[in-house]
Image (cartoon, rainbow, N blue to C red):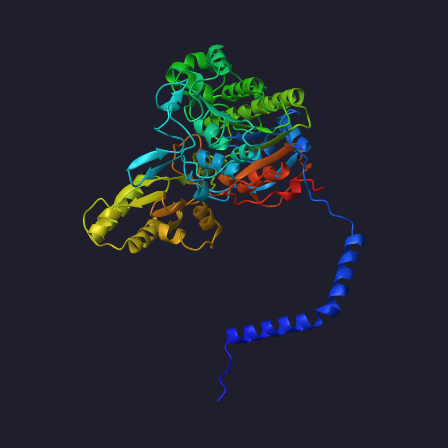
């Protein structure tokens, strides 16, 4: 009795039939195939590959991050901007109007890393500004590195590096592509704003050390001593000049109609004063506000950053030859001012109007020193900022305040009732709950079940929108947008056992000023502008992610994509030849 053929046997028989058929008839078909190929070759117009001659690559790439810049600031302050700053970038560049962060939390460290690596925290390793380390029980700062020493400064302020960054940046790929001939630098008031964008292979990263020093410094990750030009810059007295100046309104008070009146109840005064009101005499305020640190919380922090950028470009000869160099520059003062005064303050608006003038000055400087067609700029932000909840709720809007201490006490109590008295939670920070896994193993508590129990019990708090277990986040991707954003910011090795998301408008912060970190649009919607060499003028309302910025720059400059890149080029911004 004949048995039925199996699937594999049928496939083998079919393949053998095709082989024999081709062998039999190929002598008839081959001349026809050859003729068709010949006709195609002689009649078709050759298609040239889309390439960029090395001479047409920009001499300089400038990546600008504006710390805590909401997208709507460009719209709100548009009529007050000069023609040469933000307006020039928008009108003569390519403006992405609907670009958002595709992960949570929206903090400074992860934001800077994501812009320049083209990927999210789950790949580049910078999951927070600081995070709890389960193995040591310590809190880790995203730029800290005890194995290096400060250069130009003493103490922990100089013990910084990209040690925790686990993905390459645009600057790293530029160094590799040019066989290390390109020069790459990062600068910012904040160490993380200078270090993370520049990457692991940078020639240098410099940040401002305030307090009683007032100097630009670096670490032994990059060099063993400061270049002479940095020492000269530190010695020229700019820090003293800015810290002894007056911060006054750039324009008449009547021209700040986009902001709340000066001296309102939703702002935080400088220490040593009763009211947050112009003018601010920094000479009088510096003693009670960190001495040189006061520069960071005023527009002069941005002014000093640009001063340092020009000095660096001149002395390191950035953009002086045909080999592309890169400068990563972060304007940090906008974040300090936003935190202290909120998004609707005159102080915040004034800071942006002054930044606009700095950008205009810098563009003119680049025109003269590098040449209009020889540089490429991209500008974005590491996160936005939430409207001050105390103001919003007074106007019957959505929002409020959250105290995580109450959550930790409640969960600890509930777990003790079920499993016995013990220190069941070893840390709660950044909306991550770390369970005591050693205790659970000893008490034979199923970790997976305990995670789900905690995730469910915290939803009884009215301020909490969602909760997710590490077990769930480590599994398949998908579901709601919020879940995907939490997953993109999640690390199996670094994150907690349960992560929760507050409802829109809720923050854990003081009653004045503002903060950020949420997945919602007030923190995730930021501007993205491309300007200069190789950029197609225009704008787009199409949805893009923060991770699309790096591959766009790579594509414009015909450079390799960053190694962990998870974004895609913004094709609309790139002229196709």
Horizontally, residue 100 falls left or right of residue 78, namely left
* Residue beneath the point at 63% across and 71% down: 19
- In depth, the one of 300 and 325 nearer the eye is 325
Q: Position of residue 427 (x, y in %)?
A: 29, 40
Horizontally, residue 505 falls left or right of residue 78, namely left
Q: Position of residue 198 (x, y in %)?
A: 50, 30
Quadrant in which the C terminus is drawn: top right
- In depth, the one of 134 and 358 nearer the eye is 134
Rendered view: 333 above or below 540: above
In this rendering, does residue 385 appear at all? no
- In depth, the one of 523 and 221 nearer the eye is 221
In this rendering, does residue 236 appear at all? yes
Q: Quadrant of residue 73?
A: top right
Rendered view: 192 above or below 316: below
Q: Quadrant of residue 432?
A: top left
Q: In the displayed image of the protein, which residue is found farthest to the top?
A: 236
Q: Position of residue 469 (x, y in %)?
A: 36, 51
Q: How many marks?
A: 0
Q: Quadrant of residue 357?
A: top right
- In depth, the one of 271 and 176 nearer the eye is 176
Q: In the displayed image of the protein, which residue is found farthest to the bottom?
A: 1
Q: Position of residue 182 (x, y in %)?
A: 56, 28
Horizontally, residue 410 falls left or right of residue 202, namely left
């Amino acid at each position: 009795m004949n048995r039925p053929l199996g699937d594999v046997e049928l496939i083998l028989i079919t393949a053998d039939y095709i082989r024999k058929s081709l062998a039999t008839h190929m002598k008839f078909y081959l001349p026809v195939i050859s003729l068709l190929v010949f006709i195609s070759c002689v009649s078709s117009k050759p298609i040239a590959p889309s390439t960029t001659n090395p001479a047409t690559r920009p001499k300089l790439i400038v990546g600008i991050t504006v710390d805590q810049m909401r997208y709507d600031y460009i719209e709100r302050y548009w009529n007050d901007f000069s023609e040469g700053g933000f307006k020039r970038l928008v009108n003569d560049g390519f403006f992405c109007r609907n670009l958002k962060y595709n992960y949570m939390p929206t903090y400074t460290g992860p934001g800077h890393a994501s812009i320049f690596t083209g990927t999210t925290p789950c790949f580049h390793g910078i999951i927070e500004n600081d995070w709890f380390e389960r193995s040591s029980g310590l809190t880790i700062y995203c730029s800290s590195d005890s194995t290096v020493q400060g250069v130009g400064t003493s103490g922990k302020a100089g013990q910084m590096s990209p040690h925790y960054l686990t993905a390459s940046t645009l600057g790293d790929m530029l160094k590799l592509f040019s066989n290390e001939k390109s020069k790459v630098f990062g600068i910012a008031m904040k160490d993380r704003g200078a270090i993370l964008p520049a990457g692991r292979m940078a020639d240098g990263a410099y940040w401002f050390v305030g307090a009683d020093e007032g100097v630009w410094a670096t670490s032994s990750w990059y060099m063993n001593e400061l270049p002479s030009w940095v020492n000269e810059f530190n010695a020229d007295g700019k820090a003293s000049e800015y810290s002894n100046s007056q911060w006054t309104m750039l324009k008449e008070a009547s021209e700040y109609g986009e902001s709340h009146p000066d001296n309102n109840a939703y702002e935080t005064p400088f220490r040593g004063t009763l009211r947050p009101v112009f003018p601010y005499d920094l000479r009088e305020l510096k003693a009670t506000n960190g001495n040189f640190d006061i520069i960071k919380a005023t527009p002069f922090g941005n002014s000093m950053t640009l001063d340092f950028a020009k000095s660096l470009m001149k002395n390191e000869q950035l953009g002086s030859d045909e080999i592309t160099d890169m400068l990563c520059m972060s304007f940090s003062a906008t974040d300090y001012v936003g935190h202290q005064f909120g998004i609707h303050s005159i102080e915040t608006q004034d800071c942006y109007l002054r930044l606009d003038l700095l950008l205009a000055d810098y563009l003119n400087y680049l025109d003269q020193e590098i040449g209009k067609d020889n540089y490429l700029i991209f500008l974005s932000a590491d996160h936005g900022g939430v409207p001050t909840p105390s103001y919003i709720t007074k106007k019957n809007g959505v929002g409020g305040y959250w105290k995580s201490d109450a959550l930790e006490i409640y969960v600890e109590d509930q777990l003790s009732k079920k499993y016995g008295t013990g220190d069941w939670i070893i840390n709660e920070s950044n909306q991550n709950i770390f369970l005591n896994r050693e205790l659970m193993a000893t008490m034979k508590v199923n970790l997976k079940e305990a995670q789900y129990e905690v995730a469910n019990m915290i939803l009884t708090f009215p301020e909490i929108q969602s909760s997710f277990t590490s077990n769930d986040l480590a599994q398949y991707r998908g579901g709601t947008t919020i879940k995907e954003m939490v997953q993109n910011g999640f690390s199996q090795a670094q994150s907690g056992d349960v992560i929760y998301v507050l409802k829109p408008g809720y923050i854990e912060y003081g009653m004045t000023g503002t903060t950020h970190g949420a997945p919602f649009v007030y923190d995730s919607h930021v501007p993205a502008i491309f300007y200069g060499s190789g950029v197609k003028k225009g704008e787009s309302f199409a949805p893009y992610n923060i991770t699309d910025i790096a591959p766009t720059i790579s594509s414009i400059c015909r450079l390799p994509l960053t190694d962990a890149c998870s974004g895609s080029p913004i094709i609309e911004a790139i002229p196709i030849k």
